[in-house]
Amino acid sequence: MNIYFTFTLLICLSAGFAYLNQRFIKLPFVIGLFLLSTILSAIIISSKLWCNVNIAGIKNYIHFIHIDKIIINALLGLLLFAGSFHTNWQSLKQQIKPITIFALGGILLSTLLIAVSLYGVTQLFNVPIDFIYCLIFGALISPTDPIAVLGILTKANIPPKTEHIIFGESLFNDGIGVVVFVSLLITAQTGTFSFLHFGVLFLQETVGGIIMGFAIGYFLNLLLRSIDHYETEILLTIAFVMAGYSFCNYLHTSGPLAMVVMGLMVSNLKQHIMSDTTQEYLHKFWELVDVVLNAVLFILIAFIIIVIDFNTRYILIGFISVFIVLISRIIIIYFPHMIFPRLLNLTNKEAKIIVWGGLRGGLSLAMVLSLPDSETRNLLLIATYFCVLFSIIVQGLTIERLAKTV
């Protein structure tokens, strides 16, 4: 099976599930696709009980296409640019204090809290795991996924201020989470940890990514300003996103952060550098890219369940991990809310919505899939999938109702 066949299959499944959802189920778009894909995955897994299906062949094919690389190297940059391109920087700037605290300090604190809790649970179940891999799980599950957030909360009708905080946090904390994850993974592989090395890598990825985003975005804006031809300008944005993301990864700076910054720059300067016609076409194009790639993404992450080797103890730990992540989310939101109430300027209602709006998605699953094959990876994969499943289905379907009732 070649790349074209894989892409054709994903598009056909996306289109079919989107139709079924809109015609009969009527759930929010990405939730409907994820639910139907999960059901199909469950049918495939159970098919060995009632018909002769080559489950091993399907698993091998899913391993072969490398879902983690598709998400991190191909989809993430495009989706982050599309999401930030439709975001108003002035609205985010008004909430910069809570966004910074939750996106930076929240990731570090959440990683530690989740790691300690998971390590205790695994010891209780007599499951051997090194503490460093508990920290890795904390780093990969702590970021609120910008793709899940942007794909679900835009339809949830939550208050604008709260929406901007959740959006801003999700746009920036994924890059920080990836940096922490990579640093801890290097530590696990080398067996040595240096705070100096960790700090240098962290600064290189985060600060470097932001600087690269400004530099690439500035150059793109210069080019867009010099012409008035919407077809060419759309091609320029595609080229800059794809090449810029790859170049940042080559330089070991955060491509996700660079794409967020570049998207915000182009979006908020477009009135000065583009004609009304170009703005309209560019907006519609990237909106369509966002919809199509979100559909493909949520089909992909639902199929991950097929490659999981289930173990009773791992399943129990997976269930408990959902509560660990939720409790950690409550702590990282309410702790600064209670200690610095004037700094964050949040009401209890807003804090509750921000807690419940911390959705996890494809980025967490992509990171856990990138771990070396081992029993520890299988345990962390199950725990991550349970957290993502709960996040998308339960939190995603109830966030609007929570916003109306609290």
Image (cartoon, rainbow, N blue to C red):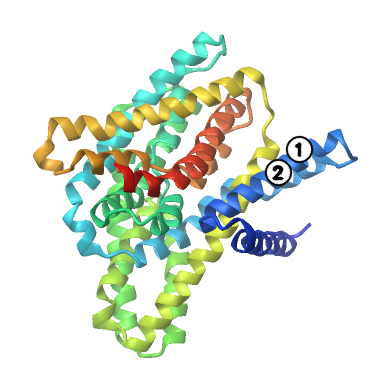
In the image, 101: left or right of 324? left
Viewer-side residue, 230 vs 47: 47
The amino acid pointed to by label 2 is: Ser
Residue 271 screen position, x and y as percent: 26, 80
Q: In this figure, which residue is indicated by the disc labeled 1? A: 45
Q: Position of residue 54 (x, y in %)?
A: 85, 41
Residue holding disc 2: 41
Q: Identity of the amino acid at label 1?
A: Ile
Percent coordinates x, y for residue 358 in the rendering: 37, 42
**Residue at the limit of the structure toward the right, as seen here:** 52
Q: CA distance from mark 2 to mark 1?
A: 6 Å
Q: Quadrant of residue 265?
A: bottom left
User: With 166 as the anchor, is 96 left or right in this view?
Assistant: left
Quarter of the rendering occupied by the N terminus: bottom right
Q: Local crowd at mark 2 within 10 Å, few (<14), some, or many (≥20)?
A: some
Asked whether residue 59 appears in the rendered view, the answer is no
Q: Is residue 90 above or below residue 224?
A: above
Residue 393 position in % (x across, y down): 52, 43
Q: Which sits in the foreground, 221 or 340? A: 340
Q: Tell me what residue is drawn at x 39 percent, y 25 percent.
A: 114
**SS for dot 1:** helix
In the picture as drawn, the residue positioned furthest to the front comes out as 405
Categorize mark 1 by other alpha carbons within 10 Å: few (<14), some (14-19), many (20+): some
